[in-house]
Image (spheres, rainbow, N blue to C red):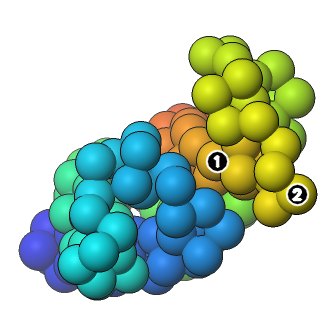
Amino acid sequence: MLLAGSLAAGILGAVFDQVTVTLSPEYFVIGKGLDAATGLRAQAAWLGFRAALPLGALITGVGLWRACTSRRFSWQRWLSSIAGVFAAALLPCAMLVAALDPFDVRAIHPPDGAGTGTRFLLTWGLHLGAYLGVALGIAVALRSSRN
């Protein structure tokens, strides 16, 4: 079950990074060190797949533990709670990182009409929101599945 959960999350991670590499290829080239000249989309998908594997194991492992310790546990409620918090965290985190520009990314990538710095910051914020959303989602799901 841990393997299945990890693989499912890996696939979702690969899809997520296909969306975000479309928004900001620079995030993956500059921020992650991928090579733009050799199949950036494939590299981003592989990176997203690998990055999400431990999240899937965590979600599944904690869910299995909760299933053994709670009479109220439901996989549907568990996963929908995590997915809801995950989705709710994405946009606010993206907007916050873009607004704060914590490492002065726009000074490094000034507006060039394409908004490279802003797109980089939004993508960075989406990734932060994804991790934060999973962590908070697990906490919410744990609380809602208490005995």
Task: Residue at 66%, 68% (x, y): give it.
Answer: 23
The N terminus sits in image quarter: bottom left
Q: Whole-percent x and y of residue 42?
A: 28, 83
| Residue kind at label 1, given as amino acid type | Phe
Amino acid type of disc 2? Gly
Q: Which quadrant would residue 12 be assigned to in this image?
A: bottom left
Q: Secondary structure at mark 2?
A: loop
Q: Is residue 84 left or right of residue 100?
A: left
Location of residue 104 with respect to 31 vertically, above or below? above
C-alpha span from label 2 to label 1: 14 Å
Q: Looking at the image, which residue is at 64% across and 47% down?
A: 120
Residue 111 falls left or right of residue 56: right
Q: Secondary structure at mark 1?
A: helix
Residue 31 seen in render? yes
Residue placed under numbered mark 2 in the picture: 113
Q: Mark 1 highlights which residue?
A: 120
- Taking the spot 72% from the left edge, 23% from the top edge, the residue there is 107
Along the line of sight, the residue nearer the viewer: 86 or 99: 99
Considering only vertical position in the picture, is 13 above or below 66? below
Q: Residues within 10 Å of mark 1 (few under 14, many from 20)?
A: many
| x and y, in percent, of residue 60 in the image | 28, 62
